[in-house]
C-alpha cells in the first residue's frame, strides 16, 4: 500500500496532533515491504519526506483544509480563508468556548510575556490577577514553569500545550504581532456585539431566547480563538 494515503488516513483519524515518532512504527512495515533493505534512518527520512509531500498537496487552492505542524505533531485543520463558514457551522452545533474579559487579558499577558509571575501580570493589568490565573489553570490554557529566582520565589506561568492546540499554533513563535492582533480583536468584539444585540432582540420577542452574559467573550477554535486570547 502506498505510504502517502496511509499517512493521510492516520493524520485524519488522530484526535490530537500526531508526531513523527508516533507515525514511524505505524507505517514501518509498509515501507519495509516496498524496500526490504532500507535501514531505520532511511525509513524515518522517507516518512518525513512523504509528509512534506502531503503537506504540499493540501496547500493547493482546491483544498479547504491543510496539514500543519501543531504542538509538536501533524494535524489537519481548516484553512484561514474558510474560517468564517466553519465558525458559523461550529456555532450551530455547540456552545462557544467562553472566557471572561479579565481572563482574556490575563491569558494574553502570559502568552506574550511568558514565563511570568502573578505580581508581574497584576502590574501590567493594573488589577489583582490571582483569581483569573486559577481559571486559566482550570481550563488548562496555562501551566506552571518553575519559580522565579527572587525573594519569595513566586511561581512562573506559561502557556500550555492545550493553548497551542486550542489556537492551532505550532509554537508560541506563531503568535501574531500586537498590531495584527489588535485588528483581529476589534473585528471579533464587533462581531460579538452584533450577535449580542440580535440575541437581546430575540429575548424580547419570545419566551425561550436569552440574552448573552455581557461579561463573557466568545472564543471559537482556531484563528478566532487566538485573536481573542492573545492581547494584553
Image (tube, grey):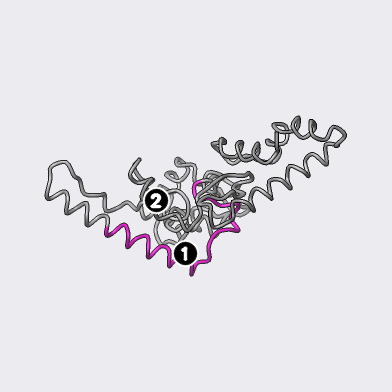
In front of the other: 93 or 217: 93
Q: Which numbered disc, 1 or 2, marks the residue closer to the eye?
A: 2
The residue at the point 62 percent across, 39 percent down is: 18
- Residue 204 picture location, percent across and down: 12, 50
Q: Which residues are magenta?
A: 166-194
In front of the other: 173 or 24: 24
- Residue 13 picture location, percent across and down: 56, 35
Query: Which label's residue is closer to the chain start, 1 or 2?
Result: 2
Vertical comparison of 186 with 149: above or below: below
Residue linked to disc 2: 87
Residue furthest to the bottom in view is 179
- Residue 181, numbered circle: 1
Q: Left or right: 45 with respect to 146?
A: right
Residue 176 sits inside the magenta stretch: yes
- Residue 72 picture location, percent across and down: 64, 45
Rate crowding at label 2 as few (under 14), some (14 to 19) or many (20 or more) other CA atoms within 10 Å: some
- Residue 135 picture location, percent across and down: 42, 44
- Residue 205, numbered circle: none
Q: Left or right: 72 with respect to 95?
A: right
SS of the residue under disc 1: helix
Which quarter of the picture shows residue 97? Answer: top left
SS of the residue under disc 2: helix
Residue 169 sits inside the magenta stretch: yes
Rate crowding at label 1 as few (under 14), some (14 to 19) or many (20 or more) other CA atoms within 10 Å: some
Label the magenta part by its dominant secondary structure. helix
Amino acid at each position: 500500500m502506498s505510504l502517502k494515503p496511509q499517512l493521510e488516513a492516520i493524520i485524519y483519524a488522530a484526535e490530537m496532533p500526531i508526531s513523527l515518532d508516533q507515525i514511524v512504527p505505524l507505517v514501518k512495515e509498509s515501507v519495509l515491504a516496498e524496500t526490504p533493505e532500507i535501514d531505520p534512518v532511511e525509513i524515518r527520512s522517507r516518512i518525513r519526506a512523504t509528509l512534506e509531500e502531503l503537506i504540499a498537496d493540501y496547500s493547493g487552492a482546491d483544498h479547504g483544509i491543510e496539514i500543519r505542524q501543531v504542538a509538536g505533531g501533524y494535524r489537519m485543520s481548516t484553512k484561514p480563508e474558510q474560517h468564517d463558514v466553519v465558525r458559523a457551522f461550529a456555532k450551530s452545533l455547540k456552545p462557544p468556548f467562553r472566557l471572561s474579559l479579565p481572563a482574556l487579558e490575563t491569558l494574553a499577558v502570559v502568552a506574550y510575556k511568558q514565563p511570568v509571575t502573578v505580581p508581574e501580570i497584576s502590574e501590567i493589568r493594573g488589577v489583582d490577577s490571582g483569581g483569573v490565573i486559577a481559571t486559566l489553570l482550570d481550563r488548562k490554557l496555562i501551566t506552571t514553569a518553575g519559580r522565579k529566582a527572587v525573594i519569595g520565589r513566586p511561581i512562573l506561568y506559561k502557556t500550555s500545550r492545550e493553548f497551542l492546540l486550542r489556537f492551532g499554533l505550532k509554537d508560541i513563535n506563531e503568535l501574531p504581532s500586537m498590531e495584527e492582533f489588535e485588528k483581529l480583536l476589534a473585528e471579533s468584539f464587533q462581531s460579538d456585539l452584533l450577535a449580542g444585540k440580535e440575541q437581546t432582540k430575540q429575548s424580547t420577542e419570545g419566551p425561550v431566547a436569552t440574552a448573552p452574559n455581557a461579561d463573557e467573550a466568545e472564543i471559537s477554535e482556531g484563528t478566532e480563538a487566538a485573536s481573542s486570547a492573545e492581547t494584553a
